[in-house]
Amino acid sequence: MIAVAGILIRLLVSPFLTVGYDSDFWATIIRNLNSGQGLYGLEGYYYTPVWGYILSFMSVLQGMFLDISIMGMRVVEAFPIEKYTDWFVSATVTNVSFNIWIKISFMISDLLVGYIVYWLVKDKTGDMKKATIGFALWFLCPLVIGVTSISGMFDTFSVLFILLCVVMIRKDKLFLAGILFTFAVLTKFFPVYFTFILLAYIIVRHRGDGTAVRSVVKAAAGALLAFFVIMLPQIIEGNLTESILFATNRIGGDGIGTIMDAIRGYVPIIFYAFCIFISLALAYLLIRGDKDKVDDSLFKSLLLMTTILFFYPPTPQYLVLLIPFLAIYIVSKEPKLKWSWLIISIGGALFTLSGNFTLLLSLGTFTNMVSLDHIMSGIELFQAAGLLGINPLSFIYVGAAFIQYVGILSVAIMILKGKNNAPEKDDKNMRGKLITRHIPFNR
């Protein structure tokens, strides 16, 4: 029932609300591919090839099963919104059918991620009820639904790959785990900060049997092979530089014009460098920890690393990576984190919906369900100066971001305080074991 409810919600939301700024890029990339220009022949694609390959596959299926002659178009009535240069808005509007088609792939990925969360929780706890709750915390999460069914961002695929990587590592399928790790990193680069933590887990698991080095080499070989296979076409075509801009663009500014511009340009570099040291520290603690508790330490470390990583910037599509680890930790270790989940979910959903009437542009352009004039009036209303000369959209945007930050900080604080609610029966069992140690053996 949870899966059905999640699917129905996505199918109901997808046709009506769309962040056109992002969906226009996906349409542009598909047009470039269909024109024979590849991913980097024309302007418009700024990621490594993984997402491009997925779009290419979707394009093939679209040609086989659908007849979408116009994926998007410039809408004259919407031209005025492009004067709002402080926001990511565009008068290029994508077809409702195209939006639904792309979002179906995200829905499938969401469902697969939910199943993996279910499997991991059940495997860790042996409790089907907890596993079901974990699935629900992911698949019914308002933030996740907003990102995949409204924003139309593809971070869910990176989450899918990294969770599969974790599964393969726990099952000791290390070569395959390395391949999946590269897929995750080359979809969205944030999982790269899991490198040291995952290697530490492998070392702890195998240092007793003398195969730690061989196991690490096996995982590294899979990762390098996947990187070579994925990037080889771009290396041959001379597009390697363009294909890694997605990472370098995030840690550099647009140029140094003022002192504040310079500071803003260096802040990401300093922060992401700092996160490397956090990852190393967490890996060190994992190696030094109790081998019998290494599995719990792994998920705790991954959750804490992800939480710290999104102190900057905590946009909803990035936070999608946090949700599955948070869900697993809630049902397996710390139920109180459900309040953090709720806060992050509310903030992320509000952040996604802050586009307000711009989200209806596809519906107004390609259907008769709502007038474009009404949509444009609504957009102008949210851009009009209000209290203290600040427009309503800014209040919503800043408020949603603040709520997200509160949720993220609460996760970090609760983990660092180390207050894990172990089941009461476990405590009793432990006390029983301690008592029996002092009972003389009766012959």
Image (tube, grey):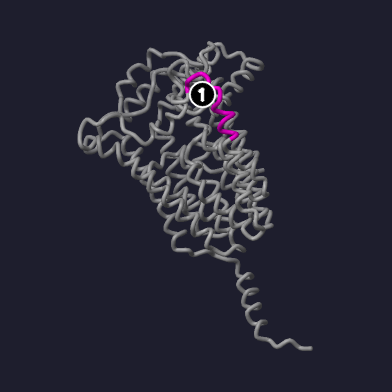
**What type is the residue that disc 1 sits on?**
Ile
Residue extending farthest right: 443
Left/right placement of residue 351 relative to residue 171 reads: left
Can you say which quadrant of the picture contains the C terminus?
bottom right
Up the image or down, 149 lies above or below 326; here it is above
Can you say which quadrant of the picture contains the N terminus?
top right
- Disc 1 target residue: 235
Up the image or down, 30 lies above or below 218; here it is above
Q: Residue at x 53, y 18 (%)?
A: 30
Foreground pick, 91 / 237? 237
Q: Main secondary structure of the magenta part?
A: helix
Place of residue 156 in the rendered image (x, y in percent of width and height, measured from the top left)? 54, 36
Place of residue 144 in the rendered image (x, y in percent of width and height, measured from the top left)? 52, 39
In magenta segment, residue 333: no
Q: Residue at x 55, y 22 (%)?
A: 233
Foreground pick, 388 / 192? 192
Place of residue 389 in the rendered image (x, y in percent of width and height, measured from the top left)? 22, 35
Q: Residue at x 57, y 64 (%)?
A: 290
Q: Residue at x 42, y 45 (%)?
A: 310
Structural crowding at the residue carrying mark 1, measured as other residues with C-alpha within 10 Å and reported as few (<14), some (14–19) or many (≥20) = few
Q: How many marks?
A: 1
Up the image or down, 279 lies above or below 192; here it is below
Place of residue 328 in the rendered image (x, y in percent of width and height, measured from the top left)? 57, 52
Foreground pick, 205 / 441? 205
Region rendered in magenta: 225-239
Secondary structure of the residue carrying tag 1 is helix
